[in-house]
Amino acid sequence: MALRITTELLGDHPRLSEIATSLPISASWIRGSDGFIAFGTYKSHTVTGKKRFADASGWWQNELTQLEIKNNVHGVGTGPILFTSFAFSQDEPSLVTIPQIVVGQKNGKSWITWIGNGQPELAKWIVEKSGLALTWEQGALSDEEWSAAVDESVSRIKRGELEKVVLARDLIARSDKAIDPAALIQSLETEYPSTWLFLVENLVGATPELLVRLSKSLVTSRVLAGTIRRTGDEERDFALAGSLAKSSKDLEEHEYAVRSVAEALEPFASSTNVPDAPFVLHLPNVMHLATDVTGVINDAASKVDIFKLVAALHPSAAVCGTPTDTARDLISELESMNRNRYAGPVGWVDAHGDGEMGIALRCGEISADQRSIRVFAGCGIVAGSNAEQELAESQAKLLPIRNALTRL
């Protein structure tokens, strides 16, 4: 007998990040006042290998056939929702999970979806600040070792072996108390409300980069590549934004990333729009060159779901490099660490195959005992890169999680 899953309109409620039930928070995807917050786990599944995106899609479709869907709201994002967190590498486990309860909001309309009988009660959630005492440790590479890896990458690029590679690094923070992922989401929301705040299976972050959104037939991808650190001085930062927009090194890095996305979408989309020049995206810690690539799914690809688009897009030049295979091999050689789900696609999918997938950046992975968190940052390396500047950029990209932890 099919298990009922029900979606009903929801009245007034606190901000998404402040909603609670008797179940612990299990997943979230929030930007501004829109998005989802989820509680409890109905089912979860692990996929690996070359077919992991197709396998995740197949598992989701099979699970949907076992649910009696009663959706009284309708629209993208209503009804059953699957949260996903894919590893950067196909060889590492990727996770998909169906929550017990989801609260969604879009354009002022809110709804609740739950599995089973009886609508769950919601209550305002007040997070108590626990005052964590954190001890920071080096990750796989020290600052000096990582800088040396940048220098080696630049040498390889200048020898013509590749055009761009993205090198990542990690740090580990150990805590005297449990790190609450829900409290971390609220802390990130305070300073980074314009990013996509995500939580899936203890991977939590505030990504500014949308790998792909599929809404009916409209495809959108926000590409970020080319970064400069903010100083906190408004006049100085305005001048830096101007220099970023004219920087040949950053424009070159950005062009590789945009080109990789546009080429990946081409088989699926018609009327693809790629702006002639990027805009500068201002965040509290850094500024990025950004381009929004859009398109419409063509008739021949009308059965495309977001999983097929993600399979074509990942890994983009923004998180791997160009050419992809050469850059991926160099990453394996020089990073000396396993990225796990860092820089992988993270987001949600609805019953129709629509959804949003960001790239898991500005994030950390909380340990199973919640007493430590591994945080990540990466930088795009091209021929004009400088190791000292790239190290400073990586430190700036670590700030969202580091600062959010200090506010808990």
Image (spheres, helix red, strand yellow):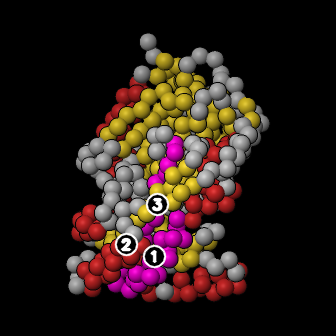
Q: Which residues are magenta?
A: 370-398
- Label 2 sits on a secondary structure element that is helix
Q: Amino acid at mark 2?
A: Trp
Query: Which of the two residues, 197 or 220, is positioned nearer the viewer here?
Result: 197
Q: Amino acid at mark 3?
A: Glu
Q: Residue at x 41, y 39 (%)?
A: 96
Query: Which of the two residues, 312 or 101, is positioned nearer the viewer here?
Result: 101
Q: Residue at x 54, y 62 (%)?
A: 208
x and y, in percent, of residue 391 in the image: 45, 76
* Residue 341 in view here: yes
The residue that mark 2 highlights is: 146
Cα–Cα gap, marks 1 and 3: 16 Å
Q: Quadrant of the N terminus?
A: top left
Give yes or no for residue 386 being in the magenta stretch.
yes
Is 256 on the left-hand or right-hand side of 3?
A: left
* Residue 189 in view here: no
Cα–Cα gap, marks 2 and 3: 15 Å
**Nearest-to-viewer mark from 2 and 3:** 3
Question: Could you tell which of marks 1 and 2 lies nearer the N-terminus?
Answer: 2
Q: Are marks 1 and 2 in contact (CB under 8 Å)?
A: yes
Q: Which mark is residue 391?
A: 1
